[in-house]
Amino acid sequence: MESPNTVNAVAVRSSFLDTLKGCSFSGIKISKEDLKRKITMHEYLRFAIRDAISEENIEGGKRHADVTNGGGECCECPLVVFDLQNVKPNEFVEYGLGCLEKFAANGDICAKQTRERLRVVVAGGDGTVGWVLGCLGELHKQGRSPIPPTAVIPLGTGNDLSRSFGWGGSFPLIWRSAIKRTLDKATYSPTSRLDSWKLSISMPSGVNLDTPHSLKQTDEVVINQDLEVLGKLPEKVSSYQGVFYNYFSIGMDAQVAYGFHHLRNEKPYLAQGPISNKMIYSGYSCTQGWFFTPCMADPGLRGLKNILRLHVKRLNSSEWELVPIPSSVRSIVALNLHSYASGRNPWGKLKPDYMEKKGFVEANADDGLLEVFGFKHGWHASFVMVELISAKHIAQAAAIRFELRGEAWKKAFMQMDGEPWKQPLKNEFSTFVDIERVPFRSVMIHGG
């Protein structure tokens, strides 16, 4: 946490507030002092939350309550801005909000109003936003309401969550005035809902899996015994679970992402911003056979149909359905948002007669459905992204089960919201990837 002499990260970072000087946006002048009064919570609450987080104890800020007698009326719309340099979102939810709730339960009217009016702004990319949303989702599990709605300051590469909710794909170079505008919009803009999806991997035990941040090992095993499987069910199973908000994919696109991430980690000087990231990513794609396939006899360059079976549950259906995978498809994506790969919409805007024929409905971020589609190769993906052709529409699904068997493949590549990993495969045993919607929908602030 920052020192008591600054507006710390639990309220609004001082570096942001220091830039809030009067300037105009579309003829509307936003006063620095008015905005500070509007979004900054009482000092005694900031100190109490700071100490609770620092001591990892909701009672840690208790001494600040002794001299306040409730603090009076709270600010109109208290904001918490996360940039993760000082406070992790799980710490804030457990200890910071816990302290605020403790004050409110003890009769502190200002703390009660602050908790009820609180809104969150996340400065970062999709991964950072997803981390904060996941931590806020724990409030729902614990029965701690209301859930603070979330706005975004886009600082990542793709920023698809930010794009989807009207906060833009990048932050302006004139960032001082943009910060002020964003904070102001976060106080009054309407809210909307966002589905999140739990992904569970069940695989033969005894195989090491180098998991990304978004996947954690668990004792829970999710294998639906009612579905016919191609391979044998392993006697001992290792299970991993995670949550995604935008997409999950299997295949060549994930392989390219995996290689790019490792290259960037080994040589960080090559990727020092969104533009250089995209240039290097595009160049790396060409070296992985995504655009040029040197030898189709190589089993690693064949379609996913050779190793993958797909079952889905349709909208308002409890029955599993086996869905054929086109033989030409080398990458399958399950997409939740309209924005993918820095603002593209590969699912496309489908005509009503086509949707009726395929049994599709209009795609939305809170419709309880994932759009499942495929890419044939890099050229196909490129033409889809510029809307010259469409992706291979496979299904809309309320739940998904992927079954993978190695055959000639020793591994497959997967990624979830931009975090890729290498998935080991066995020939004799199947690996299962199950996806189902999380019951709670995240609350987003819609910026425009």
Image: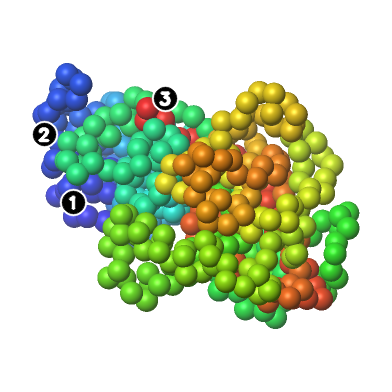
Is residue 217 in view from this perspective? no
Closer to us: 373 or 88: 373
Name the side, left or right, on which 399 lies relative to 234: left
In the rendered image, which residue does mark 1 sit on?
4
For image coordinates 69% across by 61% down, the residue present is 304
Instruction: State how many labels appear.
Output: 3
Q: Look at the numbered disc 3 and give the secondary structure of its residue.
A: loop
Amino acid at dot 1: Pro
Asked whether disc 3 touches disc 1, contact meaning CB atoms under 8 Å apart, the reply is no
- Residue under the image location 66 percent in, 23 percent down: 352
Residue 306 in view (yes/no): yes
Mark 2 secondary-structure assignment: loop
Q: Are marks 3 and 2 in contact (CB under 8 Å)?
A: no
Q: Which mark is residue 190?
A: 3
Residue 223's x, y, as percent? 79, 60
Q: Residue 123 at x, y = what percent?
A: 32, 47
In the image, what residue type sits under mark 2? Answer: Lys
Identify the residue position indicated by label 2 in the image: 21
Q: Residue at left 30%, top 59%?
A: 276
Work out whether 93 lies above or below 229: above
Do the CB atoms of the residues marked 2 and 1 lie less than 8 Å apart?
no
The amino acid marked with disc number 3 is Pro
Which of 157 and 106 lies nearest the eye of the viewer? Answer: 157
Question: Based on the displayed image, in which of its 4 quarters is residue 140 positioned?
Answer: top right
